[in-house]
Image (tube, rainbow, N blue to C red):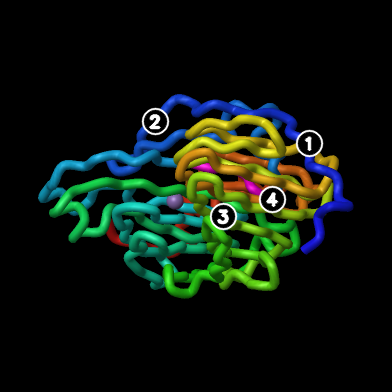
Amino acid sequence: MNTASKAAKTIEAVYGPPPQHWVGDGFPVRGYFSHIPKGMRRLSPFLLMDYAQPYEFAPTDNLRRGVGPHPHRGFETVTIAFQGSVAHFDSAGNGDVIHPGDVQWMTAGSGILHREYHAPEFARKGGMFQMAQIWVNLPAKDKMTEPGYQAITAGQMGVVDLPKGRVRVIAGEYRGVKGPANTFSPINMFDFDLQPGGEAEFDFPASWNTGLLVMSGAVTVNGKAVKQDELVVFGQEGESIKVEASTESRLLLLNGEPIDEPVANYGPFVMNTPAEIETAIRDFQAGKFGHLDE
Ligand code: MN
């Protein structure tokens, strides 16, 4: 791929880690978009990113560590397990354990209930836990689509080996290698690592939104130094991104075509208008999202 003729993507801002909060008693996360101006809209189609840095959990007999049944409507939740395992079960009848390296791409669509707990075998043994959950918006025409579920195992990822690194393609395409996730709007989602001295180059349309989280290590991004736990938000000028690692580094890259539609959000519902939010709340209270045991 020749990127020499393309302009470097501008960097709009680099955000440090926001404060940590707990989701249930299982997920010590930082809501990375929470302090970005226009947070839910700025990185459209990505609405939210909760990232749990590596955290050591003690062994427990509590096999309900996490969050019990709760609803979602109007978007997708993408859960990436880096360390530790998450057990999921939903009202559409899908259930799975997400092991390290696996990704769960759940389409809430018209409405779903799910529970998210540490997997029983992980809870009993304890150990290091690290994960991310990204909320991906659905275009208005697809918000009431039937709920869906893609269980993507580590072995199914698209893999591109670099001279000093490796890119795992979850969604979209990198150097001709496609990711396994089916998406409703154009998205590239890559998880990649670099060895000291390693480099990776990417090339995206200027108008697409791009965020880059440095999960570990230290890198320069288009010449700018970025540290562990920082999030780079790129401007909508220029196409090319060059990441150079000075130490062993692992990063998560989100890129997508913006969905230029109004966003109305209340808790676990993301719709286009306040009236649709009211309908979502009424439908949930009326039991229209199905049933799910604790
Ligand atoms: Mn959830």
Q: Earlier in the sequence, mark 2 or mark 4?
A: 2
Residue receiving disc 2: 21
The mark lying in front, picked from 3 and 1, is 1
Amino acid type of the residue tagged 1 in the rendering: Thr
Q: Give the quadrant of the N terminus.
A: bottom right
Q: Nearer the viewer, mark 2 or mark 3?
A: 2
* Residue 73 image label: 3
- Indicate whether residue 288 is drawn in magenta: no
Label 3 to label 4: alpha-carbon separation:
15 Å
Please report whichever mark, 1 or 4, sits nearer to the chain's N-terminal start: 1
Q: Is the stretch drawn in magenta largely helix, strand or loop?
A: strand
Is ligand 1 less than 8 Å from the beta carbon at label 2? no
Label 2 – label 3 distance at C-alpha: 23 Å
| Residue found 54% across the figure and 26% down from its top | 16
Residue 45's disc is: 4
Q: Which mark is residue 10?
A: 1
Q: Earlier in the sequence, mark 3 or mark 4?
A: 4
Q: Residues within 10 Å of mark 1 (few under 14, many from 20)?
A: some
Q: Secondary structure at mark 1?
A: loop
Magenta range is 45-50
Check disc 4 and give the amino acid type. Pro
Give the residue displayed 52% in from the left and 57% down from the top: 165
Q: In screen coordinates, is 204 left or right of 102? A: right
Depth check, front residue: 290 or 221: 221
